[in-house]
Amino acid sequence: MDEEKNKTAKHKHDPFFRWLFADTSHTKTLLELSGKVNAKVDRFLSTVNLDTLVRIPDSYSNVSDTGEGDLAFRVSVMSGAPVLVGIVLEHKSGNDPDTLNQIAKYVNALMKIHGDRRGYDLIPTMAIIFYNGRTNWDPFKKLVEGYPEDYLPSMLPFMHAFVNMTDIPDSDCLACEDIATGMGIVAMKYAYNKDKLLEVLPQFNERLRKMPRNEASCLWQKINIYLAEYLGKDIFKELDMAFVSIGQKYGFESAGDYYRKQIAEAEEKGETKGHDDAISVLQDMGLPPEKIAEAKARLDALKK
């Protein structure tokens, strides 16, 4: 069991979550949907103006690759006062005992506003953990074991909320005008439940057809690759069957076909450049590091 937990926790920085919610319009939708199921998020949203939401560019690259913060934003308060607050979105797909330390370091490194008249550089920050793991887990509840609830604010240098993505109703995702966010949440909710995934995700079929071709193609490939990391490559075929009309309309390849074609072309060329090109494409697609390493090993074997 511990081995399974550790394996799951290694996902920490899912490229799919980071790719999707680096777009502030998607983040805004995610927060609004979360506010419907989480009182802390709802109260926080009532104090800020999400129309002023700005991402701190490439913030995740300023820390080590051990999971210290996925995405960071700054936003103005609703009152109109000339002050900012911070938002950190931390995604976890497994039990990670060091999560709160990671967020504290991240907040301390990023959420600062310097000024001649400021007596304290840090700005108030809301850290929200988005979780889509197999089992129940909430690091904030674990933290206060043995302490009264009143001690929690003084223990953490940030406001906090924990959102289990399974709590966001399918109906809200399906009704969401932001199709990419709705589909993304469903994909993450059911990343470990293939039957439920194949029941709910195809309900986006007609709505996906309304998206611009390039956006729909990119989203579909990203979702395919994300789900393959959790459910295995067989999910490619099942998703293709469920969304066959999408492929016919747009004429784009599934992520599985694209992945296999890139490897096959490089193997056929038998040239170093072909190998490097294939690996570069797979990296751009957001394929997990272990999958890229697997593909690279196959290609490197051809050079010998």
Image (spheres, rainbow, N blue to C red):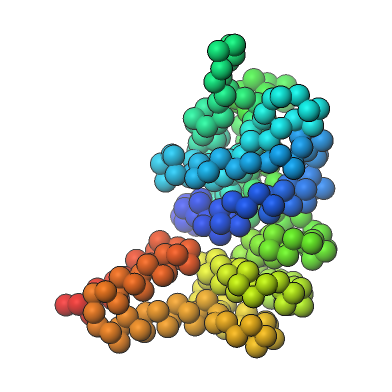
x, y (%) of residue 51? Answer: 74, 42
The C terminus is located in which quarter? Answer: bottom left
Q: Is residue 3 left or right of residue 55?
A: left
Q: Number of marks in the image?
A: 0
- Which residue is painted at 72% across and 77% down in the image? 209
Between 194 and 269, which is closer to the camera in this rendering? 269
Let me know if residue 93 appears in the view: no
Q: Is residue 97 left or right of residue 74?
A: left
Let me know if residue 33 appears in the view: yes
- Which residue is painted at 56% across and 67% down in the image? 222
Between 57 and 189, which is closer to the camera in this rendering? 57
Q: In the picture, residue 192 is in which quadrant?
A: bottom right
Using the image, determine if residue 194 lies above or below residue 21.
below
- Which residue is painted at 51% across and 50% down in the image? 12
x, y (%) of residue 186? Answer: 70, 64
**Please, which residue is most extreme toward the left here?**
304
Between 45 and 149, which is closer to the camera in this rendering? 45
Using the image, determine if residue 299 lies above or below residue 34.
below
x, y (%) of residue 225? Answer: 53, 69
x, y (%) of residue 229? Answer: 51, 67
Q: In the picture, residue 144 is in which quadrant?
A: top right
Using the image, determine if residue 301 lies above or below residue 107.
below
- Which residue is painted at 69% across and 76% down in the image? 198
Between 30 and 163, which is closer to the camera in this rendering? 30
